[in-house]
Amino acid sequence: MSAPIHPARTAATALFLLTSLNLFNFIDRYVLPGVQPLIQREFHINDAQTGLLTSAFFFTYMLIAPATGWLGDHLPRKPLIVAGALIWSAATLLTATVHSYHTLLIRHAAVGIGEATFSIFAPALLADFYPEEDRNRVLSIFYVTIPVGGALGYLTGGVLGDRYGWRMPFYVAALPGVLIALAFWLFVREPQRGAADTLQSTAERASFAGLFRNPAFLTATLGMAMWTFAVGGISTWLPTFLRRFAGYSVAGAGLTAGEITAIDGLLATIAGGWLAQIWLRRNHRALYLVSAWSALLAIPFGLAVFFGPLRILLPGAFAAEFFLFLSTGPLNAAIVNSVAAPIRSTAISVNLFIIHFLGDAFSPGLIGRISDKTNLRFGLAATLLSLALSGAILFYGSRFAPRLPDLE
């Protein structure tokens, strides 16, 4: 006779292991920005070609997402999550073995295959462990790994790359994902799809066609796309900006960018989740409103970083990234809560396609092109325009936020 399931313990184990996997998901993704100057030197490539490396990753990520969403709504998510982690870990390892720019471009793009599958199935699975009123808190924990993993990726790339060459960080980053995926396979039992949902499953919320008539989903997705344009562009070019305009070494730029992202990301993601959770008790629009204000408040500090004097670069960067990351949990919770369980993986896959198609699939390369024609300051200024659009869309979208029964 099998051992009884303890739902709270199983949910906590799933959250811990999926959060750990997501951490290395983002470490693997952000090793590249940490070693970009070294790669530019070895392969003799300009800023536009360098930005294309990250854009190629996101193009793959974006195109794979729609094909995998259907799988997550019709097949068990657990083996799909494990497969995704193994694919991205293998591709990260292979990235370290390349000796030409075009091979590097192809193999880095392949990392996006594994990461796209994981990024769709993991939040959908977590939504089946936790009801709507808890998802902001849970996803704030899960997505705190975006800034922390990004920071550790910068650090791994910058520090190890400076000392041992740009290939070493990719070797180091590849193994942990395999080990955590094995633990997830052994210790987590998948819940029934939709087990924790309490909101009514209407046609608008529970069908593919309904996604495109669902204003709560569409506005959250478009607002997130503009946010993603900014975050993807800034995260790709921040270490290079610090090296070029503030005189940092490769290691120093990676370390500084990593510290800013880690500290801000951790504090702001926790603060944003906490603020939204409290505000939700009084206003069902809180997930959208916190996200809108965070985008708009980051803009003046971004201007100070990109165009201000050197003495305010670091405090400005800390303030800008703090406001950027306030929306991490609330905005992802808004996406998950806007749809019902039968199409949640599909909805997340559509969301991922749109946010990358309109966001960071283009922003690193676009910033690089603007930089080649003017300078990197003007290239990065494009991210501030996208943040203004994000805030406007999310303020409008707040009127469509679903009311959560347990918080009324």
Image: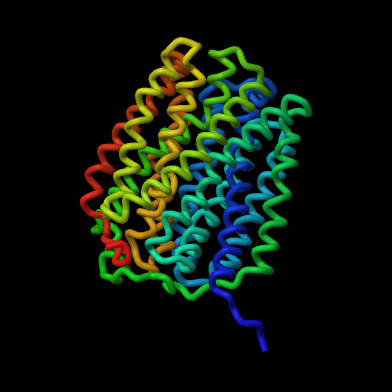
Among the 4 quarters of the image, the one containing residue 294? top left
The residue depicted at 51 percent of the width and 25 percent of the height is 48
- Image vertical order of residue 240 relative to residue 128, above or below: above
Residue at 30% x, 71% y: name it: 201
Left or right: 116, with 209 as reference point = right
Residue 24: where, in percent of width, then height? 63, 47
Q: Quadrant of the N terminus?
A: bottom right
Q: Nearer the viewer, residue 102 or 241?
A: 241
Camera-side residue of 176 and 132:
132
The residue furthest bottom is: 1
Where in the figure is residue 140, as x and y percent of width and height? 47, 50
- State the image quarter where residue 247 is shown: top right
Quadrant, the C terminus: bottom left
- Check the image and report above or below for 29 versus 64: above
Q: Residue at x 48, y 24 (%)?
A: 317
**Quadrant housing residue 2:** bottom right
Residue nearest the observer in this picture, 113 or 129: 129
Q: Identify which residue is drawn at 68% across, 57% down.
A: 180
Question: Percent from the top left, x then y, of residue 322?
Answer: 45, 33
Q: Nearer the viewer, residue 59 or 404?
A: 404
